[in-house]
Image (cartoon, rainbow, N blue to C red):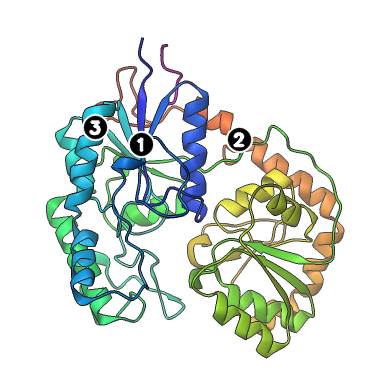
Amino acid sequence: MTRKRLLAINNYFYRRGGAEAVFFDHMSMFGEIGWDIVPFAMQHDLNEPSPWSDYFVSEIEYGRRTGLLRKAVQAASVIYSLEAQRNLGRLIERARPAVAHAHNVYHHLSPAIFSTLKAAGIPVVMTVHDLKLACPSYKMLRDGKVCEDCRGGRVYNVLRHRCVKGSAPLSAVVLAETLLHRLLGLYRDKVDRLVVPSRFYLEKLAEWGWPRENMVHIANFVDVTNLSVHRQESDYFAFAGRLAPEKGLTTLIRAVALSKQRLVIAGTGPEEQALRGLAAELGADVSFAGYLSGERLHRLIGESRTRPPVGMVRKRSHKRARNLRARATGDRRSDRWNSRNGEGGRNRPVGRSGERRRPCQSATRNGGTLARGTRAHGDRWPIVGRDRILRRRLPGEDTRSLRGNRCCLRVEPPSV
């Protein structure tokens, strides 16, 4: 029998950030249990090779110098990409996928593809990596503070506050995008099930009116088969992730400057130059390691003293069994840790954050206990083990096909 095909959809087809790491890990997981994976993404020089790349849509990369006509074409594609619909239609005709699993699609592929999938009778599952379904600018942050002004349909605030890079034109495009997508029901009516890795995000989306019965919490995972708990601790704290405003890195740099600690930052992003300037201004001992992956990233985390967990980095720290210090900032507001899993706490003014250096140092001296605690936490809850995700059955699932409104992620091996 022909193997079942999974249509895996994401804007980028290279490991650009945490969402892409999950995207590639999911494809690998499904492939290992017998599914045939068909990707659909955007063309890019850094893309991984794929026999299906001829169907990828044209690259849209923001921030480059382009003419007014090109900008107008890009704005139209951001709102509703006809090219993505055409290419996806051709791909569906050739590949005949059994189910589609989408990740980040806005601003590049656009959710117009959900209409194409619905018309073809293909059930759609979407993993929610941020708060875009509620907040037009996806962060619920403005000027470094939590903002929920768009709640209750008041999405005009995205233009009023110029939430997108402080630009009125960009914010206007995002407002138009949001209004059209909601009018057409591209997310609400065309996506069968939302998989939400963060319980906080799930609760927040429910508060903003998303039907709870259409959402399910399945946390991200890492492969723990080669986990080893060891301590070869160096003299630095480490951060690994995208260098973006919502990560709270300015607070972290100010804290290490006050506490005279060494910090290594692994990653790239729009805030890199500003963070370098802040570190130089404060005389902080901060090293920027650039983008790291694989063994180099594992070694950085494995030998660090502690670091604030962010996104998939939190899961990788479980894998390396390092002690954790959680911060309640930005997209990590739901993270809370106790003294057995690392030192957790709410945001504090930077002075008080710096003053917490001694308790944090005490935590690192008991790192063996903390490391075992993080591993035990991972064993108790399905947030690190891939096998737990494979065994997970979602609420409301029956034994029939993944088609229809009861669609969910069931990852049993297909018959071959």
The residue lying toward the viewer, choosing from 341 and 48, is 48
Q: In this picture, which residue range is highlighted in magenta?
A: 411-416
Disc 3 versus disc 1: distance between alpha carbons?
Answer: 11 Å
Q: Position of residue 187 (x, y in %)?
A: 24, 49
At x 54%, y 63%, the residue is 242
Q: Which of the two labelled residues, at mark 2 and mark 1, occupies the earlier sequence position?
A: 1
Quarter where residue 221 is shown:
top right
Q: Residues within 10 Å of mark 1 (few under 14, many from 20)?
A: some
The residue lying toward the viewer, choosing from 71 and 101, is 71
Amino acid marked by disc 3: Ile
Q: Are marks 3 and 2 in contact (CB under 8 Å)?
A: no
Q: Residue furthest bottom?
A: 281
Is residue 414 on the magenta stretch?
A: yes
Residue that numbered label 2 is attached to: 385
The residue lying toward the viewer, choosing from 253 and 280, is 280
Residue 267 visible in the current orientation: yes
Q: Which of the two labelled residues, at mark 3 and mark 2, occupies the earlier sequence position?
A: 3
